[in-house]
Amino acid sequence: MKVGVLALQGDVREHVLALQECGADPVIVRRSAEIAAIDALILPGGESTTIALLAQVFDVFELIRDRIRDGLPVYGSCAGMILLADRVLDAVDGQRTFGGLDITVRRNAFGRQVDSFESDLSVKGVTPAPLKAVFIRAPWVEQVGQGVEVLASIQGSDGREHPVAVRQGTILATSFHPELTGDHRIHRYFLEQVCRSATRIK
Ligand code: GLN
């Protein structure tokens, strides 16, 4: 299985290392021929607006959107989650996403004064708990559609629980950055649960 990491902007190297430490052989991708050749894709953390703009500059935006729509297994962390969301709150004017994941996310939801923090999470399918999660200007999920499974939630400043890890079939997304902690269980979950289920469907 050829796993690509989209290398337009963001923490590409950290995802590559995490995948390698899981025993995968990742490739970095940014051109259409490279993206056409992969069996799974990771959208890194970074800045969702910049990644979307660069995807248009490199003329791969529609290709990525269509491959996700056609069932390419994909995992997005933080900015990657935003890029997978069908609906974005607090987006910049004209911000586009690849979509595919039936959620509404709020960008930079955790507020300015707590731009970064760590939290111990309990993530469904990842044992034993807890998983240390790093949040950096992270989004949270405001609303999920019917086919979306919530894997982890956290209480926001509004006092409500908000999903921060979700899965819809072949699409996995987290508000946090498992690529930064050295604990690769989310990457392993992606490779073993999400990618394998996609292979079975084919
Ligand atoms: N706030 C960023 C965005 O909107 C995401 C931050 C991150 O990926 N760490 O894309």
Image (cartoon, rainbow, N blue to C red):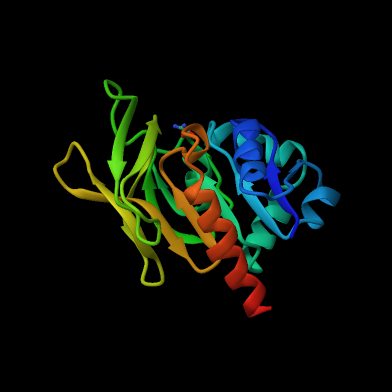
The image shows residue 26, relative to residue 157, as above or below, that is: below
Please identify the residue farthest to the top as the structure is shown: 113
**Residue 103 point in image, percent of width and height:** 40, 57
Q: Residue at horizontal 32%, vertical 31%?
A: 118
Q: Is residue 184 left or right of residue 22?
A: left
The quarter of the displayed image where residue 116 is located: top left
The quarter of the displayed image where residue 14 is located: top right
The quarter of the displayed image where residue 195 is located: bottom right
Task: Note whether residue 83 is visible.
Answer: no
Q: Nearer the viewer, residue 139 or 12?
A: 12
Task: Note whether residue 18 is visible.
Answer: yes
Please identify the residue farthest to the right as the structure is shown: 33
> The N terminus appears in which quarter of the rendering?
bottom right
Q: Is residue 89 left or right of residue 14?
A: left
Q: Residue at horizontal 59%, vertical 31%?
A: 11
Q: Is residue 60 left or right of residue 114?
A: right
Q: Is residue 200 left or right of residue 163?
A: right
**Residue 53 point in image, percent of width and height:** 64, 36
